[in-house]
Image (cartoon, rainbow, N blue to C red):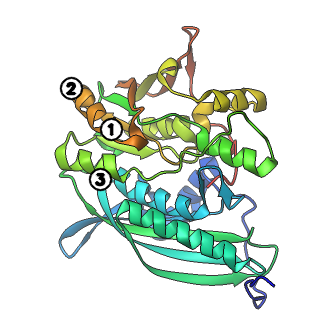
């Protein structure tokens, strides 16, 4: 008989949020609840917050992963948690050093499933050169946990003189995309709903430590960088344009989208620019640094498709030139296109 997690003592929360994720709900929670309670650090424009620790500049981040199913083409909840946290630190200009891991286990979860997830986390951490140094485990009654949730926190050393940040974006900056978009969200959705695409869509789940650490060490250092998770490329650009109070103009024909991903989006009514990624980033650099940045990124498999997709101008908002030569305004969707994809 397979070993399973024991039944816990029942525990009920006083308040339940019906839907988790990014977008306008998160912005509302930050503005109305977290910011008044915790102060400015709870509204950091990055997924990692910079702070001083004994005179050493450092970055800290935390994130929770509730993806369903736990295993999907190209990754699983374990590799997703490690790679996502590593990438959040990198986007703040930090060299990832150590992670913690908290596990919320649903009663009845096969221990072999947990072993697979933990082994995947170890492999991803080893590949990124970080250690998982602390953790915690809780068990909740079925069916309150979708099998397994993971929270990871990470700390890193700031590796550049001027850490990337939205306020450092300048008019004229080149916008570089490090890879193709939409694969993670479509891969998870297809696995969840039993949809078959030919060829199968693989998640882009990957750590970006190698190319970004090379950029930090040799230059040119980016003005800003953002990994394109929930909300995808479009969501990240809209958020950064608002934070920087500048206009971003991009060329849709320069944005790589795999044919199966494009076909799936057309079939299901999704905009691939707003579908989640887990191994892709947008990088903002001075126009004279674009070629040198591309040369570094293209030396690494995870960012080999890097290309310039647009530029920063004075003004506001995000506009995209389409293949037909028209221009459309990018506006974040009011709700999640693909909930629970990370």
Q: Residue at x 73, y 72 (%)?
A: 145
Indicate the position of residue 36 as horizontal and vertical percent values.
Answer: 50, 65
Indicate the position of residue 151 as horizontal and vertical percent values.
Answer: 55, 70
What numbered label is drawn on residue 288?
2
Mark 2 surroundings: few (<14), some (14-19) or many (≥20) residues within 10 A:
few
Residue 259 as seen in the image, left or right of residue 297: right
Given this view, does label 3 or label 1 mark the residue nearer the observer? Answer: 1
Which residue position is annotated with label 3?
A: 93
Q: Nearer the viewer, residue 202 or 140?
A: 202
Q: Check whether the beta carbons of the residues at disc 2 and disc 3 lie within 8 A of each other.
A: no
Q: Residue furthest bottom?
A: 9
Q: Check whether the beta carbons of the residues at disc 3 and disc 1 lie within 8 A of each other.
A: no
What numbered label is drawn on residue 256?
none
Residue 160 as seen in the image, left or right of residue 98: left
Which residue position is annotated with label 1?
A: 297
Q: Is tag 2's residue or tag 1's residue first in the polypeptide sequence?
A: 2
Q: Residue at x 53, y 61 (%)?
A: 79
Q: Say if 48 sits above or below 73 in the image.
A: below
Q: Residue at x 68, y 54 (%)?
A: 340
Indicate the position of residue 267 as horizontal and vertical percent values.
Answer: 77, 28
Q: Let me know if residue 145 appears in the view.
A: yes
Q: Quarter of the image containing the C terminus?
A: bottom right
Q: Is tag 2's residue or tag 3's residue first in the polypeptide sequence?
A: 3
Q: Quarter of the image containing the N terminus?
A: bottom right
Q: CA distance from mark 2 to mark 1?
A: 16 Å
Q: CA distance from mark 3 to mark 1?
A: 15 Å
């Amino acid at each position: 008989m397979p070993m399973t997690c024991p039944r816990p003592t029942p525990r009920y929360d006083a308040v339940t949020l019906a839907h988790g994720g990014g977008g306008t709900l998160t912005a509302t929670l930050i503005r109305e609840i977290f910011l008044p309670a915790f102060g400015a650090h709870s509204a950091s424009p990055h997924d990692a917050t910079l702070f001083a620790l004994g005179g050493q500049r450092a970055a800290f981040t935390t994130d929770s992963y509730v993806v369903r199913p736990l295993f999907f083409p190209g990754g699983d909840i374990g590799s997703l948690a490690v790679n996502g946290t590593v990438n959040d630190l990198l986007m703040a200009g930090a060299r990832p050093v150590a992670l913690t891991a908290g596990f919320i286990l649903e009663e009845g979860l096969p221990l072999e499933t947990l072993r697979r997830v933990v082994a995947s986390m170890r492999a991803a951490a080893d590949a990124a050169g970080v250690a998982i140094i602390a953790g915690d485990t809780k068990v909740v009654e079925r069916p309150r946990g979708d099998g397994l949730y993971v929270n990871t926190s990470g700390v890193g050393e700031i590796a550049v003189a001027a850490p990337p940040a939205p306020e450092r974006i300048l008019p004229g900056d080149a916008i570089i995309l490090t890879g193709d978009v939409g694969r993670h969200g479509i891969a998870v959705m297809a696995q969840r709903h039993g949809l078959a695409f030919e060829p199968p869509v693989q998640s882009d789940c990957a750590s970006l430590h190698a190319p970004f650490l090379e950029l930090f060490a040799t230059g040119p250092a980016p003005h800003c960088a953002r990994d394109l998770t929930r909300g995808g490329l479009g969501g990240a650009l809209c958020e950064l344009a608002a934070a920087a109070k500048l206009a971003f103009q991009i060329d849709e024909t320069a944005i790589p989208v795999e044919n199966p991903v494009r076909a799936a989006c057309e079939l299901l009514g999704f905009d691939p620019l707003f579908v989640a990624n887990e191994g892709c980033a947008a990088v903002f650099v001075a126009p004279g640094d674009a070629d040198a940045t591309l040369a570094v990124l293209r030396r690494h498999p995870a960012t080999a498709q890097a290309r310039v997709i647009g530029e920063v101008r004075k003004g506001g908002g995000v506009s995209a030139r389409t293949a037909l030569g028209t221009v459309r305004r990018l506006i974040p969707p009011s709700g999640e296109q693909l909930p629970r994809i990370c």
